[in-house]
Amino acid sequence: MAKVTFREDRCKGCGHCIAVCPVKIIEFDEKLNLKGYHPAIVKEENMGKCLGCASCARMCPDLVITVEK
Amino acid sequence: MAVVFEPTKGLLDVPTHYCPGCTHGIIHRLVAESLEELGVIDKTIGVAPVGCSVLAYNYFACDMHEAAHGRAPAVATGIKRSLPDSVVFTYQGDGDLAAIGTAEIVHAAARGEKITTIFVNNCIYGMTGGQMAPTTLPGQVTETSPYGRDVKLQGHPIRVSEMLSTLDGAVYVERVSVDSVANVLKAKKAIKKAFELQIEGKGFTFVEVLSICPTNWGLSPRESIKWLQDNMIPYYPLGVKKDITQQEVK
Amino acid sequence: MAEKVLMKGNEAIGEAAIQAGCQCFFGYPITPQTEVAAYMSRRMPKIGRVFLQAESEVAAINMVYGAAGSGVRVMTSSSSPGVSLKQEGISYIAGAELPCVIINIVRGGPGLGGIQPAQSDYFQATKGGGHGDYRLVVYAPSSVQEMVDLIQDAFDVADIYRNPVMVMGDGMLGQMMEPVEFKEREAKQLPSKADWAATGLHGRKEHHVINSLFLQPEELEKHNEKLQKKYAEIEKNEVKYEMYNCDGDLDIVLVSYGTVSRICKNVIKMLAKEGLKVGLIRPITLWPFPKKAFEEVVDRTKYGFLSVELSCGQMVEDIELSVKGRKPVNFFGRSGGMVPSPTEIANKVKEIAGGAR
Ligand SMILES: Cc1ncc(C[n+]2csc(CCOP(=O)(O)OP(=O)(O)O)c2C)c(N)n1
Ligand code: SF4
């Protein structure tokens, strides 16, 4: 069981995390955040697939992501 | 559940001004994590350059000093000589370090100043809107090399790590990249080692980090990563250029 | 009382700084001030302090910037072409409000100029030099003893106002040997640097940032207003000048600083024998300029003022601004390393006085 949390309002929607996630569970939200970007999110139904590898967090330039396992 | 990854205390909890996908943010984090893990945030003074990372002083949790364009190594020298027990780093772009500040970086390295320089090479002047840098690749189009850099007219790019590794005062020189998770981990190791060697008083340490500038390259963040991999890494080979703690030098 | 020692001006500069607690010196060789660096290179390591020969004056002043931001007393020294290169750093240091002392042993310019004594950096020192709305306190000693005293004052004034201070001498002052006494100075109550210096947090909560960048126009304007207030305070408190032979009714008042003022004093004695009553205003601070000295004599001075310089009239404008058109302001100077003879100056005075006898 692992859990990834996004501080969505910090996200600039660059997509680095989406590209490196080995199980491809990260996607852009349809909604815009306060900065006006489509932030990266993991839908509740996909969270169970998270490996807790923190690849996404390591590629994030904006300290958006926290990973627990 | 245990925390696998959380924001480092080496950075203040504020959003940065960097463009979406710009890897300055990753490099900031690696520096800050290294300082945190080594337990030296409390005695570190960072020197910010002039360039996109000019506002780095708003992000690092340690004391900071904002230098004039290119002069960070001289400012860092003044700091380290005044406070020899402190940990001092400069964070500089390629225009800052390899054009206007060439003399300062070469001589800081030659003197073996006990400082660490993080050199962010993105092949372009980011802050001023994408002009040719000393590291701009042959053929690369920028605002001031609109027909592509012609080495016959505009000279050749400088491989700064290779150049500095010839200086006896430099004890550790490595070129890394932040284009993939594996390379980010390697970059972190290099940056941390550079600080460790500084703390041990060994001499000048230098980590060149290949970085992207999606905005001025005119590419998306992901296209930029690919451009770095396809164009920059072949010209600027990754790896240790010098390490006095391991006599084998590449 | 400390005893007097015979010392070359440039070496006395070094010793004065050491006695004032200068922890770091960053320099670069240039005639005619190289002996300052040489002296510091001998003395500083022996007492556990820092001497470093930088790769250029640009680097040297930026090292000063770093050390000053770390909260230590720091000095650099150069001569005219080198001081031109330091202007970038001086502007940053002024902008970031850091204390430091800069020595300029002036030689003739423009360009590479010459290596003989001059005062042709007056504009550069007093009117900016670097970019932006900033001011330097500029001391202009006329003897080795005064230079030693002013250097020690300079460190205090720099600390009090968090501002760079320049001590400007001509090449003569650097090269001449004179007896000097390093006076015991009473410890001054100076403001603590703990609330701004970037020394490493060491448990402190807020990080300190040494900086001169204010991207928001409102913020930069506020910063500039703060600086201007400080400069007004300096103008109020730190003006220094000497008035020589300025009592009673005067024919002419000479205005001159540095070693030339010593020649002027001889001229005054010479002319007294010829029945001319000539006074001297000697600015000791070139900025802030001693405007009030002129108030004291302007109404009692028949033929006005004569600026005597080793430059081409750079001080004239400041004198005119002080005299405000009430009396004529004349000029006599030599440049390029040429020094006026007393007779030359005397002849100019007589010419202005128009044969008045
Ligand atoms: C003395 C001086 N010259 C020029 C500039 C304008 N300037 C600001 S940033 C910059 C280029 C920075 O490029 P680089 O160091 O590559 O960093 P990046 O912005 O790409 O991170 C320039 C030329 C300046 N601030 N000061
Ligand atoms: S301009 Fe380039 S280097 Fe600067 S923040 Fe944007 S992407 Fe990064």
Image (cartoon, rainbow, N blue to C red):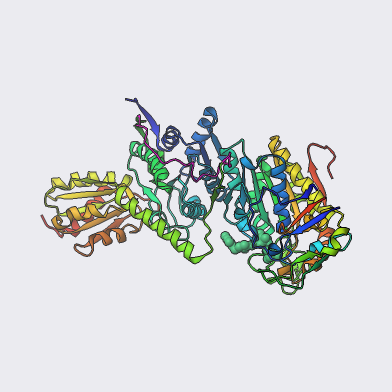
Q: Is residue B6 visible?
A: yes
Ligand 1 picture quarter? bottom right
Residue B22 within the magenta-colored segment of the rendering = no
Q: Is residue C194 magenta?
A: yes
Direction from residue B189 to residue C115 in the image, left or right: left
* Image x and y of residue B182, in percent: 85, 53
**Residue at the (35%, 37%) spot, across then down:** C149
Q: Quadrant of residue A21?
A: bottom right
* Numbered disc total: 0
**C127 to C263, vertically: above or below:** below
Residue C116: tell me if it is visible.
no
Q: Nearer the viewer, residue A41 or C101?
A: A41
Residue A25 occupies quadrant: bottom right
Overall secondary structure of the magenta stretch?
loop
* Residue B205 picture location, percent across and down: 72, 43
- For the point 20% across and 47% down, the residue is C268
Q: Position of residue C173 (x, y in %)?
A: 38, 41
A47 sits left or right of C276 in the view = right
What stretch of residues is rendered in magenta?
Answer: C184-203
Looking at the picture, how far across and down is residue C303, in whole percent?
Answer: 16, 59
